[in-house]
Amino acid sequence: AIQMTQSPSSLSAFVGARVTITCRASQGIRNDLGWYQQKPGKAPKLLIYAASSLQSGVPSRFSGSGSGTDFTLTISSLQPEDFATYYCLQDYGYPRTFGQGTKVEVK
Amino acid sequence: EVQLVESGGGLVQPGGSLRLSCAASGFTLSNFWMTWVRQAPGKGLEWVANIKEDESEKYYVDSVKGRFTISRDNAKNSLYLQMSSLRAEDTAVYFCARDKTYYFESSGYYYDALDIWGQGTVVTVSS
């Protein structure tokens, strides 16, 4: 199975800060990667698909980049509603695999 | 409104069985692959299984192969997960999700993503 390694596992940041989360695949996965946001007690929400395409309705402060094995999710200016846990998911091979998650907390 | 609603969770003894359902509304289920994802208490997300529109392809994570079966009834707009030989480590919130395919004309490539999720149903395996 393709392993997805996310870093950091958690971070603290101020409102307005620029935040970057990375995901590394154990083998090349083209651009077959999505980013999801999950708030406590809620279902995950799709933010980014195909590594860099913004899902409809998602604020433009979210962006994704990367291809092959290294990917990045960036929040350009952190807002109070962005404090959550973020996951990457590869959809290149089976079984699909998630990163272990990055919890973004208020500083 | 596009919506997925899971049901069927509950408390079951180790070795027991349970069938989860996912009711789709606001879209035509037969046009989409569908997926189950689970989340153990305090843990991250784990992809469990998915199924093609016509049931001709099904894929599973290794830890549930031979014990779980994904199926669907497009006429009833419903997705199912039959779980048997349940273990304590199967305890989790189980989410169903719609697997949308995006086509990029510039590259000719297709990409998938889980664009609609249900609220989840809780499965607890304990004696």
Image: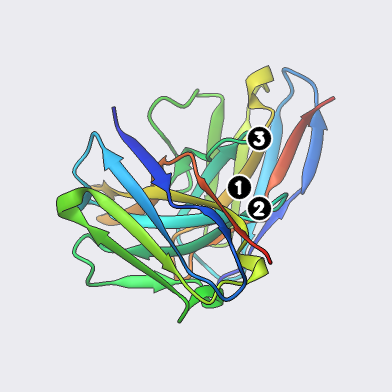
In terms of secondary structure, where does tag 1 sit? strand
The part of the image, by quadrant, that contains residue A57 is top left
**Do residues under tags 1 and 2 come within 8 Å of each other at their CB atoms?**
yes
Residue indicated by mark 2: B44
In terms of secondary structure, where does tag 3 sit? loop
- Residue B55 location, x and y as percent? 23, 67
Q: Which quadrant of the figure contains the N terminus of chain B? A: top left
Which chain letter goes with mark 1?
A: A
Colouring mode (rainbow / by chain / secondary structure / one colour): rainbow
The part of the image, by quadrant, that contains residue A64 is top right
Residue indicated by mark 1: A87
- Residue B105 location, x and y as percent? 23, 47
Say above or below: B52 vs A66. below
Which of the two residues, B100 or B90, is positioned nearer the viewer here? B90
Disc 1 or 3, which lies upstream in sequence?
3
Which of the two residues, B10 or A38, is positioned nearer the viewer here? B10
At 51% from the left and 47% from the top, the residue drawn is B121
At 62% from the left and 72% from the top, the residue drawn is B14
| Left or right: B36 as drawn, with respect to A84 | left
- Residue A8 location, x and y as percent? 77, 48
Q: Amino acid at mark 3?
A: Pro
Q: Is residue A31 visible?
A: no
Residue indicated by mark 3: A40
* Residues beneath discs 1 and 2 located on the same chain: no
Which of the two residues, A69 or A3, is positioned nearer the viewer here? A3
